[in-house]
Structure formats: C-alpha cells, structure tokens
C-alpha cells in the first residue's frame, strides 16, 4: 500500500476509536488553521531556504547547506514521534530511501522534538536518515510553518497522553504544519507539499515521480 492509502486507513480507524466531540475539536483546529491562511505565507517552490544548522539525534550539528554541496535534499517537517501519522510518513520515507538516493537526493527530517526524543523516534522507526531537532521551531518559523495549538486541542492531546512540553523541551505548545520540500543544490525550493491537515502527507511515490522527471 502507498503512504496515502495507509494514512486513509489510519484515519478511518481513528474515526471509530474516538468520540465525536474529540473529532470535532480536532477538525475545528484544522479549520482554524486554514482560516489563518498559513499556507499562503509558507515558503514554496521558487523560494530560497534559510540557513539550516540543527542538532541530529546524536546531538551533532548538521548543516543542510553542506549536504547541498553534493546533492539535492528532501526536507520533511513532521510534528513528533508521538504522532501516528508522522510515524507512518517516516516509515514510508525510509522505505523509499534507496529510490531517493538513486535520484541524487538526501533525505532530512525536522521536528521540534528534543534530540533525545528524536533519537527515540529514529530508533522506533529504524530510520537511517538524519532526524534533526528544531528546538523552539526556529527553522519552521523561518519557513512560516509554525502555529500554536488551541487550548481545547491541547487538552485533547493531554488526554491521549501527549505532553508537548516534555517532547519539545518548552511550554510553547507550538508545532509545524506538515510540509515536504525538495531543495535544489543552490538552495532553491523546486517542489513543495504543504497541508494544514496533519492526516495528509506527501506520498514518496509522488516525490520519486517528480525527481525522475526533473
């Protein structure tokens, strides 16, 4: 199955698992995000990326611009290892890694989680690509991807056992919307997929199709 199909299956299972009022709060959160027109402000195809220097899961600083000296970069912003949709995406990206590499690209994932939590996410999903910690969402904010969760959604997440303050190492309750970019070697974005709905992600099959025709 494709990532898109896996995400739909997960969404259907979620509909049966949680009560209607919980889904209403989550759907209201997505609608509120859309109302802010956050995507209109986000970096897109044709824009140049800012300098990105972030610690990986081993707390070693990685500079994306140095990677770009050798090859293109696929940049995937995800919410955290606590998010089942993110884990589906990360696993799908890992499976597609050999094809990405054949197309002359390197995969880098970014989340607001601390390096320790990024390490847990990496180990849980058997990831062999770099998972970087964007503490305080500093880089995500430069891409204009960051938003603050509404209070009722924070409470829903707490009910799920999700503690963003612990995951991200700060009390801000901020996350990036899910976004995937392909960055050319000169730092220009040549592909973007950005969604307010966390249940929608760029399918690796579509990314590979783009890379093969580029």
Image (cartoon, helix red, strand yellow):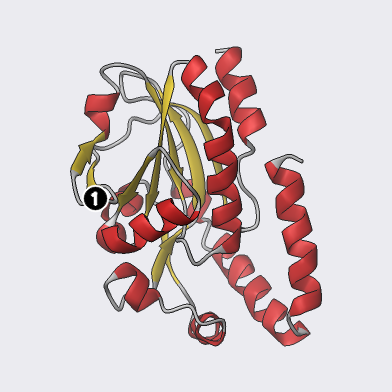
Give the residue at x 68% y 43%: 3
Q: Quadrant of the C terminus?
A: top right
| In the displayed structure image, the side of residue 112 where residue 39 appears, left or right | right
Give the residue at x 61% y 66%: 30
Check the image and report above or below for 84 versus 63: below
For the residue carrying disc 1, how many other residues have a C-alpha within 10 Å: few (<14), some (14-19), or many (20+)?
Answer: few
Give the residue at x 76% y 54%: 8
| In the displayed structure image, the side of residue 74 where residue 14 appears, left or right | right
Q: Nearer the viewer, residue 65 or 13?
A: 13
Residue for badge 1: 58
| In the displayed structure image, the side of residue 139 where residue 145 appears, left or right | right
Q: Quadrant of the N terminus?
A: top right
Percent position (x, y) of residue 182? 46, 29
Q: How many marks?
A: 1
Residue 114 visible in the displayed image:
no
Of all residues shown, which one is farthest toward the top?
213
Q: Nearer the viewer, residue 164 or 56?
A: 56
Q: Nearer the viewer, residue 117 or 70?
A: 117
Give the structural element (helix, strand or loop) at label 1. Answer: loop
Percent position (x, y) of residue 135? 26, 60
Give the residue at x 32% y 34%: 49
Residue 182 visible in the displayed image:
yes
Q: Nearer the viewer, residue 107 or 25?
A: 107
Percent position (x, y) of residue 147? 43, 64
Check the image and report above or below for 121 versus 164: above
Percent position (x, y) of residue 136? 27, 63
């Amino acid at each position: 199955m494709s990532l898109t199909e896996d995400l739909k299956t997960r969404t259907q299972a979620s509909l049966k698992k949680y009560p209607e009022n919980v889904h209403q709060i989550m759907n209201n959160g997505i609608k509120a995000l859309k109302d802010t027109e956050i995507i209109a402000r986000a970096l897109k195809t044709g824009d140049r990326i800012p300098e990105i220097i972030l610690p990986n899961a081993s707390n070693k600083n990685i500079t994306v611009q140095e990677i770009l000296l050798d090859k293109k970069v696929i940049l995937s912003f995800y919410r955290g290892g606590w998010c089942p949709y993110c884990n589906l995406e990360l696993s799908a990206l890992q499976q597609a890694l050999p094809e990405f590499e054949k197309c002359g690209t390197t995969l880098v994932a970014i989340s607001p989680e601390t390096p320790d939590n990024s390490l847990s996410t990496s180990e849980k999903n058997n990831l062999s690509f770099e998972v970087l910690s964007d503490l305080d969402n500093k880089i995500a904010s430069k891409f204009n991807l960051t938003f603050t969760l509404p209070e009722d959604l924070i409470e829903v997440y707490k009910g799920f056992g999700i503690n963003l303050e612990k995951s991200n190492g700060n009390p801000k309750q901020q996350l990036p919307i899910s976004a995937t970019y392909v960055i050319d070697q000169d730092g220009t974005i040549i592909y973007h997929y950005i969604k307010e709905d966390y249940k929608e992600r760029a399918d690796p099959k579509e990314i590979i199709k783009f890379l093969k025709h580029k």
